[in-house]
Amino acid sequence: MSESYYERLVDEDALVAYLSDHLEAVEDYEISRHQEGHSNETLFVTWGDRELVIRRPPPGETADTAHDVLREFRVTDAVADTAVPVPEPVLACEDHDVIGSDFYVMEHLEGSVLREDEPARFAEPEYRERIGEELVDTLASIHGVNYEAVGLGEFGRPAGYTDRQVERWGQQLMWAFEVTADEREVPALYEVGSWLQEHAPESHPHTLVHGDYKLDNVMFGPGEPPALIGVFDWEMATLGDPRADLGWMLSYWRDAKDPEPAIPELTNRFMEREGYSTRRELVARWEAQTGFEFEHERFYRALAVYKLAGLGEMFFRRYLEGNSDDPMYPRMEDRVPALAARAQRIIEGDEPL
């Protein structure tokens, strides 16, 4: 991280003045940037004896892009008094004179995010099983929120959500193909897209959806047994189809019987170990908790992988145009076709739930 980039993220003097006005003035404070890669930027702030987190879009982005942090604050604030565990929201700021963008402040949580491996304290079969149960139970609690009662009745258009997802990600792929097709074609993605259009469910339940719900977007508390204490990264949240959330979560969850992953560099495999729930067990628990059936399961799982392929192809275009130095992006030349093949296996029943 260069100093100039950090200075683009935060004007420390202006932020300190803002926090002093809206919280309390303190003698001791510290501000640092969280290094984990997320689409929005995260800053850690020690403010006296309080530990806070600030979320803001990357420099140069505007609130009408996907980086709408005030939307994140709105949904987090709305569900804070429900069964959904979230960090306590503190402040939201629309005044760009403070740090150059919208931002919001929330309380910092202490615990473990399971990105690369399980914590040693969870390396017992009964604790491993509880990780999956907590993950699914929390997703069910999101889908059980009375969104009208918490003030989110106008948060989205749930009707037609699934059709719009298929259309949107098809458009994202077409944008990427404008450049990437000169390097290599991925005809399987056209076939997957056509199948999804033909098999999109005619109707679906209407619930609050997270939009990016997966194991590394939640935090488990510091003790044991595993207890899920926070759900993060709500920027894709809206009103829509809960089965799309479940399909997305399952696309990241490995079973011991699975073939080699399409993107091994970005795939966590620790849930293949003894004790972890299978995808079928997770689905059965979600159905029992929500009262919904995971109908059209091949559609939802294939849609999730199609979206992953869309992300990968957009990364590949950015690499080809010289707009990224991320070493993963050029690997998408081979990884996206592997994702397309995975989607086809799901559709054909060769990669079962």
Image (cartoon, rainbow, N blue to C red):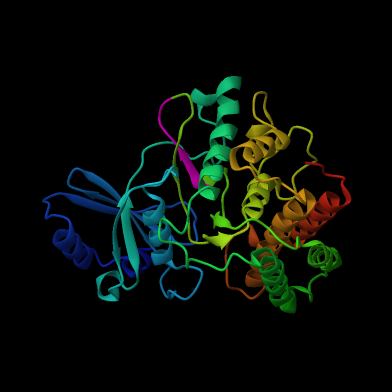
Residue 221 shown in magenta: yes
Instruction: List the single residue furthest toward the bottom.
Output: 178
**Is residue 51 shown above or below 176?**
above
Identified at 69% across, 77% down, the residue is 175
In percent of width and height, residue 124 lies at: 57, 20
Q: Quadrant of the C terminus?
A: top right
Q: Quadrant of the N terminus?
A: bottom left
**Is residue 154 shown above or below 73?**
below
What residue range appears in magenta?
Answer: 217-223
Identified at 48% across, 66% down, the residue is 155
In percent of width and height, residue 70 lies at: 39, 66
* Horizontal relation, residue 119 to residue 331: left or right: left
Which is more toward the observer, 165 or 159? 159
Quarter assignment of residue 78:
bottom left
Which is more toward the observer, 20 or 186? 20
Which is more toward the observer, 320 or 200? 200
* Horizontal relation, residue 52 to residue 168: left or right: left
Q: Is residue 1 visible?
A: no
Residue 264 shown in magenta: no
